[in-house]
Amino acid sequence: MPLRSITIPTKLLARAKQKYYSNTNRFANNFVFYLPAEEYLKIVTRPVLMTYAFNVADDKENEMEHFIKTYTGKSEPLMNYESRQTAANEFNNMRSMFLMVGGILSFIIWPLFAAYPMLLFLALAIPFVVYRSTMRQSIVERLREAE
């Protein structure tokens, strides 16, 4: 379906700069905006899924979460709901994964750094010793040993 351009006169109520990405599905999007549902339905002919964010007082958070779980479980079973705790758990799981991978890599990399000076010494010493031993013998002596 081709995109169509429309112009709708609106009144600016407020303008805000957000210092973080606030879309709850955690997918990046360069075009995030908020509209009242009535305005959204006037603009869009085929409505798509929307994201709703709730700003709830700390002491009412458990009550609201229970209400939304009940609502999405019974009244709107097709509606997806992710709680604040779900997002926090996912973040902690990802953080734990990075800590584990970083710890494993540090156990792999540090022994290499510790062995690097010895390997560098061997890379310089072995060719030098071989060169010195071959310089002691003449070409004729080396050819006789090869036969």
Image: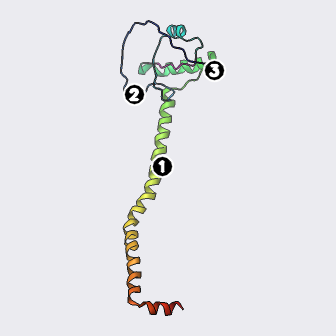
Magenta stretch, overall SS: loop
Q: Quadrant of the C terminus?
A: bottom right
Q: Position of residue 9 (x, y in %)?
A: 44, 6
Mark 3 or 2: the one toward you: 2
Disc 1 residue type? Val
Q: CA distance from mark 1 to mark 2?
A: 26 Å
- Seen from the viewer's position, the closer of residues 22 and 73 is 22
Disc 3 residue type? Leu
The structure residue drawn at horizontal position 47% and vertical position 43%, both measured from the top left corner, is 96
Neighbourhood count class around disc 1 (C-alpha, 10 Å): few under 14, some 14–19, many 20 upward? few
* Helix, strand or loop for disc 3: loop
- Seen from the viewer's position, the closer of residues 145 and 11 is 145
Q: Position of residue 41 (x, y in %)?
A: 54, 9
Q: Is residue 80 left or right of residue 87?
A: right
Q: CA distance from mark 3 to mark 2?
A: 29 Å
Q: Position of residue 81 (x, y in %)?
A: 56, 24
* Helix, strand or loop for disc 2: loop
Q: Is residue 35 left or right of residue 128?
A: right
The residue that mark 1 highlights is 101
- Seen from the viewer's position, the closer of residues 134 and 31 is 134
The structure residue drawn at horizontal position 55% and vertical position 12%, both measured from the top left corner, is 44
Disc 2 residue type? Tyr
First of labels 1, 2 by sequence position: 2
The residue that mark 3 highlights is 78
First of labels 3, 1 by sequence position: 3
Please state the extent of the stretch shown in magenta in the rendering.
48-55
Q: CA distance from mark 3 to mark 1?
A: 37 Å
Neighbourhood count class around disc 3 (C-alpha, 10 Å): few under 14, some 14–19, many 20 upward? few
The residue that mark 2 highlights is 20
Mark 1 or 2: the one toward you: 2
Q: Is residue 22 above or below residue 138?
A: above
